[in-house]
């Protein structure tokens, strides 16, 4: 551009930008200097090219400082930006090797903690950023063998599991990490418990005793949670006994019509290294309903349990987490710095597990995720501060529980969130979804057809009407029993969620 007196303004602008960039670089403000040196109107200037070369070296130096300060993400980002500024490849390679040496110790901490899956994820993520060295590659092989062994053990393939653990031990060398030795002891203990449980399962299947098959399948899955035959047997048993009245201990056998009395008590495992398999209470099995169809109840309601607390109960298989407010779109709306639709928790169609899908920044146990499975004890972080704990207290129910563990709350004064699958158990044992100390027996709210039912010990009242054993309820019912009482209160759908949208909007389908 030329002024009326014939002078160019480009020269002045270029000198001003160069001076500002050099001042920022001299003050250590590398990002500001790089932004000034990359402006489109001056980017091709020879002086700016030289300045960017110097800034690339500054980024490499800052990367080292960040790594030593445990800012791994910042260190990796600096090296990536330095590569874009054409820093010498040998200098970048040296910096990345030094960074890999620092990280190798952190990976060792994951392995010492018995978390090979996290180690594999971290090493793979580093490799994508060109951070690698022989120690990391060896740790990756060890962690992968260990992780695959755990996967095989969860499926009941114990021979393959031991092969994987042997390979992991060879890669680890002497001394073998204590956590790896502990894994071997645990797998061996579970193998000893699983073998007779699987025998009982096949015997019950062969006799066509579906109630006994259900109990045996649950016993196997308690120790071997992904045993394929036990999962199939459990589904088939539910299909066969779906019409059996809750509370009954006598079941018609589909094959010949005769009745079989079933004792639900199993032996507790006393094998060292394996958590005891507690005898399941008959009422819990009686209330666990068969898998529901698409016409089952949906939406949300509040469950107020006297002398215990209040709970937000979400019935849908997809539950949106997000920010509370007048235009809240979330099923679980939190008073915090979140997006209106921040993440979605999804329950598998067969009720076998849960996943979280991120819409905005979401973390599970400190790791950023786009989509990840959830297991009992996981801590979900939404944004930078909102944290929720995910729990699956009962192995006999797909229902889960959320508890806000950060200093945030819902607009409603509730003590927790229930992601209700088939049942919501109120009781005093560790398998209850809502803890009610002192309750003589579990009280269960469960799905029945297109509505809800309640079952409790002895006689009780629903909306003032006397009932025995079980009774249908609505989301406006009050229940009064011997030593307990609770009431339900309906909630409207979030503002933008239609009657069939489940708050998912335009999210892509699960794959």
Image: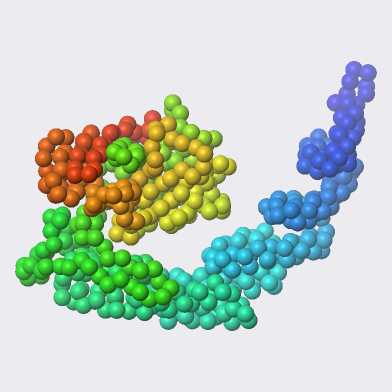
Q: Quadrant of residue 255?
A: bottom left
> Residue 471: x and y, percent?
15, 44
The quarter of the picture where the C terminus appears is bottom left
Report the coloring of the rendering.
rainbow
Q: Is residue 150 left or right of residue 102?
A: left
Residue 273 seen in the current view: yes
Q: Residue at x 6, y 69 (%)?
A: 258
> Residue 276: x and y, percent?
35, 69
Pick the residue in front: 129 or 111. 111
Q: Please, is residue 30 above or below residue 9 in the view?
A: below
Q: Residue at x 24, y 60 (%)?
A: 281
Query: How many numbered marks have been drawn onto this rendered protein structure?
Result: 0
Q: Residue at x 70, y 55 (%)?
A: 70
> Residue 160: x and y, percent?
44, 79
Residue 232 seen in the current view: no
The quarter of the picture where the N terminus appears is top right
Q: Is residue 247 left or right of residue 403?
A: left
Q: Residue at x 16, y 38 (%)?
A: 462
Q: Please, is residue 153 above or below residue 290 in the view?
A: below
> Residue 282: x and y, percent?
21, 60
Q: Please, is residue 275 above or below residue 402 in the view?
A: below
Pick the residue in front: 55 or 86. 55
The single residue placed furthest to the top in the displayed view is: 4
Q: Please, is residue 27 above or below residue 251 in the view?
A: above
Q: Is residue 342 left or right of residue 215?
A: right
Q: Quadrant of residue 430?
A: bottom left
């Amino acid at each position: 551009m030329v002024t009326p007196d014939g002078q160019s303004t480009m020269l002045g602008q270029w000198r001003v930008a160069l001076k500002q960039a050099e001042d920022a670089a001299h003050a250590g403000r590398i990002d500001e200097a790089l932004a000034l040196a990359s402006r489109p109107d001056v980017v091709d200037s020879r002086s700016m090219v030289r300045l960017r070369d110097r800034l690339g070296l500054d980024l490499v130096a800052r990367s080292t400082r960040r790594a030593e300060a445990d800012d791994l993400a910042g260190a990796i980002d600096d090296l990536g930006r330095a590569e874009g500024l054409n820093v010498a490849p040998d200098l970048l390679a040296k910096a990345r090797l030094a960074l890999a040496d620092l990280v190798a110790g952190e990976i060792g901490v994951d392995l010492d903690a018995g978390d090979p899956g996290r180690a594999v994820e971290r090493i793979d993520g580093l490799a994508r950023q060109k951070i690698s060295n022989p120690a990391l590659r060896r740790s990756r092989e060890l962690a992968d063998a260990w992780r695959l062994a755990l996967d095989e053990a969860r499926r009941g393939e114990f021979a393959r599991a031991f092969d994987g653990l042997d390979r992991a031990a060879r890669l680890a060398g002497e001394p073998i990490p204590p956590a790896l030795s502990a894994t071997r002891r645990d797998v061996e203990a579970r193998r000893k418990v699983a073998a007779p449980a699987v025998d009982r399962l096949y015997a019950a299947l062969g006799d066509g005793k579906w109630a006994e098959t259900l109990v045996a399948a649950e016993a196997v899955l308690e120790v071997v949670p992904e045993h394929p035959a036990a999962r199939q047997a459990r589904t088939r048993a539910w299909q066969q006994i779906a019409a059996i009245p809750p509370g009954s201990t006598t079941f018609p056998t589909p094959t010949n019509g005769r009745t079989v009395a079933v004792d639900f008590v199993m032996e507790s495992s006393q094998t060292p290294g394996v958590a005891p398999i507690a005898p399941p209470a008959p009422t819990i099995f009686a209330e666990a309903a068969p898998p529901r169809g698409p016409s089952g109840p949906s939406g949300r309601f509040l469950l107020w349990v006297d002398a215990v607390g209040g709970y937000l109960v979400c019935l849908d298989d997809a539950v949106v987490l997000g920010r509370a407010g007048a235009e809240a779109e979330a099923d679980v709306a939190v008073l915090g710095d979140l997006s209106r639709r921040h993440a979605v928790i999804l329950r598998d169609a067969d009720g076998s597990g849960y996943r979280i899908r991120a819409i905005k920044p979401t973390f599970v146990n400190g790791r950023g995720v786009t989509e990840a499975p959830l297991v009992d004890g996981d801590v979900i972080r939404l944004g930078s501060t909102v944290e929720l704990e995910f729990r699956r207290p009962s192995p006999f129910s797909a229902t889960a529980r959320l508890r806000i563990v950060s200093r945030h709350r819902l607009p409603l004064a509730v003590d927790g969130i229930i992601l209700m699958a088939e049942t919501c158990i109120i009781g005093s044992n560790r398998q209850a979804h809502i803890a009610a100390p002192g309750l003589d027996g579990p009280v269960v709210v469960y799905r029945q057809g297109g509505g809800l039912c309640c079952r409790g010990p002895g006689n009780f009242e629903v909306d003032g009407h006397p009932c025995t054993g079980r009774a249908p309820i609505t989301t406006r019912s009050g229940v009064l029993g011997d030593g307990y009482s609770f009431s339900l209160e309906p909630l409207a759908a979030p503002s933008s969620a239609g009657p069939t949208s489940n708050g998912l909007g335009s999210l892509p389908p699960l794959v």
